[in-house]
Amino acid sequence: MPARHHGGMTKVESLQPRHTVDRRIGMLMAFVAATLAVGAFVHLAGYTPAGSKPPFDASHAGVAEAIIGVVLACAAIAVLRSSSRAWSIAVAATSFAIFGFLVGLNITARGGDVPDVIYHVTMLPVLIVSLVLLLRTGRAD
């Protein structure tokens, strides 16, 4: 079925609102993903200082950090490439990361090292601010 043109836009395109995302949010997401890559490497390579206790497990933390990092990196790429779905991908990925950080903070606060707790307490607000900015500035073009 051919699409009809209305003011430079096809009818199909006009039915699908496109959200724009400030590239700075994409860069911030990429930064958080990079810090997670470092954290995953540290935990999975066994460089975590001794003294952690259950429920904290460095290898579990490393896997979680790697997964969250990959999700955020993919979303950052979508934002930086101005994908038509960048806004929804960024909102979903940031929400997922916030949930992961809350779980991680809960576990780390009960058995992790101080640097791990500081990392979670520092980066969680960054993610929350990113989500708030996405929700406030996301707009249909």
Image (cartoon, rainbow, N blue to C red):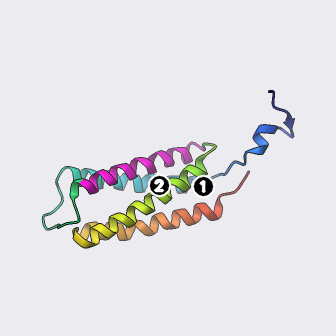
Instruction: Please name the residue shown 22% across and 53% down the image.
Output: 59
Residue 28 visible in image: no
The number of callouts visible is: 2
Q: Is residue 28 magenta?
A: no
Instruction: Tell me: 97 left or right of 92.
Output: left
Label 1 vs label 2: CA separation?
Answer: 11 Å
On residue 22, the disc is 1
Mark 1, other Cα within 10 Å: few <14 / some 14–19 / many ≥20: some
Q: Which residues are magenta?
A: 60-82
Residue type pointed to by label 2: Met
Q: Earlier in the sequence, mark 1 or mark 2?
A: 1
- Residue depicted at x 28% and y 57%: 61
Residue for point 27% across, 53% down: 62
User: Tag 1: residue type?
Assistant: Asp
Coordinates of residue 16 in the picture (x, y in percent): 73, 45
Residue 29 tag number:
2
**SS at circle 1:** loop
Residue 31: quadrant of the picture: bottom left
Q: Position of residue 127 (x, y in %)?
A: 47, 63
Name the residue: 44% across, 58% down.
97
Residue furthest to the front:
55
